[in-house]
Image (cartoon, grey):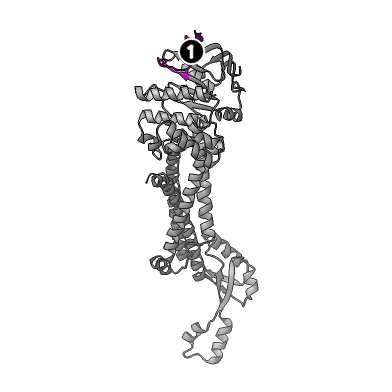
Amino acid sequence: MDKVIMAQDLSLSYSNSETIINKANFSIVSGSFVFITGASGSGKSTLLKSLYGALKPKQGSLVVGGVELKGVTTSKLNFLRRHVGIVFQDYKLVKEWTIEKNIMLPLIINGYEKGVTQNQVDSLLKHVRLKHQAGKFPLELSGGEQQRVAMARALAHNPILILADEPTGNLDDYSSQLIWNLLEGANEQLKTTVIVVTHHIPQSMNVDYKHYHIEYGSLHEVV
Amino acid sequence: MKSFKNHLSLVTALLSILFSIQIFIIVDRSIEAYNESLAKNYSVIIVSQKKLDSKSILSLNSMISEVSELSADSVIKRLNSGISAKNIELLKLTLPKFYKLSLTHYPTPSQIEKLRRDLLTNRAITKIEDFSHTHDITYKLLLLFKNVVSLFAIVVFIVTSLLIFKELRIWQFKHSERMSIMGLFGAPAWLRSAVLFRLAIVDAIIASVLAFGLFIYISSSSWVQEQFSNIGISVLIFDIVNDSTLLFVTAIILSILLASLIVLGHKEEV
């Protein structure tokens, strides 16, 4: 089985502050669905940030999609990020762009042709049940709708890995369920590896998943 | 409307810089033209005991552009009642020679002083009338005008620089978020900043076109032409080729510089 993420003695900290993740060892197999849980401030989001290179390892080794993130160059980091889809709790949509253009972003960055891009966006808008909202700007949508746009953007370029940071943290039950369905669908149908940082694992998960928990800076698998 | 607002602030700042540059150019041209007009009307009179040839006077100082001898006839006419023709001829021979010297440009007081010294090296020259008192007043007025305009240009430059700096902060804030989001999806630096540079270049073009239109209108205004003719000068207000090139290049350089500062000042979100 291919390993999409490998961490050895991984320690993480923000500059000049105390260590947040201490000597974590884990590996994630391609196509798996993983939950990372922990109390507020335990370091869940910090660990996720390190997976897309927003925070470099302080010590140890972290390989994501074949790219060693310790001392990674900008071009290699950009290469990795072009193959990863990220979903944030605060959506991180470009407010002055329409939702179509937001979804298009990873496709433009990956150099897809205009025709392919438009078809993909149309199909994703249907998939996230927002076809009727095409042409609108993010701030014209509800929080749940914005998160569905962010999901569509994360799925647009068929990434090898989806990283989701508390994707349902601000959403109502209906929107949360839609997001979980989309993440499960990507994992089941496209065999995309999905890593979700969350406080609570939903009861109604239809896929097999792995569960890691962070406590006092150490990461351990919950069996 | 939103797109218009996005452009308005930088276009306004760029336009005010272009406006102040062109105004400075016009004032500089006006001063130059006024200087030439003053130089044309200004001359130095010298008195010599003997006849001098033009070449010898011209060689004394490079500022002298033309030498003409003043006829003594008008003076003699006033004296000729009761004087015989023979005596008048004798008087003509004994009268000193008067020369009027035209200069290449309107001189500074120190240049007048040097001219005076140079002329006196010719022993035949006994007296020099340089109308220095009148000259000094006019020259000081010209200098005051120049200084006031320079001060005005500096103030406009400082104010517009502050405006540009403020605009830079707003742009930095506005574009940082989008650039960070693009970075999270692996966009290379050129792609992240492409929108910014495109906006900056479009704004520079808009500001330049507005400035061209404004100055073409001003240069065709009869009221403006009348003001210049009132002070006896003719000034080219807007040189379509040279001035538009200068304004366009300035606007492009400024806006690209602004965009580059934002790109360089952008920090990756962690």
Instruction: Please state the total of marks drawn on the protein image.
Output: 1
Residue A145 x, y percent position in the rendering: 38, 30
Q: Measured along the vertical axis of the image, is residue A206 above or below residue B61?
A: above
- Quarter of the view holding residue A178: top left
Query: Residue shown at 53%/39% (left/top)?
Result: A116
Side of A141 where A123 appears, left or right: right
Is B35 or A76 nearer to us in this picture? Answer: A76
Task: Pick the residue in front: B78 or A152.
Answer: A152
Q: Is residue B155 above or below residue B52?
A: above
Residue located farthest toward the top when viewing the structure as drawn: A223
x and y percentages locating residue B6 in the rendered image? 41, 44
Stretch in magenta: A196-223
Picture residue at 44% right of the left edge, 51% below the top: B15
Q: Position of residue B174 (x, y in %)?
A: 43, 37
Q: Label 1 belongs to which residue?
A: A211
Return the x and y of residue B155 as percentages of the image width and height.
Answer: 43, 48
Q: Is residue A211 located in the magenta-colored stretch of the structure? A: yes
| Amino acid type, label 1 | His
Q: Badge 1: few (under 14), some or many (20 or more) residues near its Cα, within 10 Å? A: some
Q: In terms of depth relative to the viewer, which is nearer, A130 or B77?
A: A130
Q: Is residue B157 magenta?
A: no
* Residue A43 in view of the camera: no
* Chain of residue at mark 1: A
Q: Foreground: A185 or B156? A: A185
Dot 1 falls on a residue whose secondary structure is strand
Q: Is residue B79 above or below residue A103?
A: below
Confirm whether residue B111 shows in the render. Answer: yes
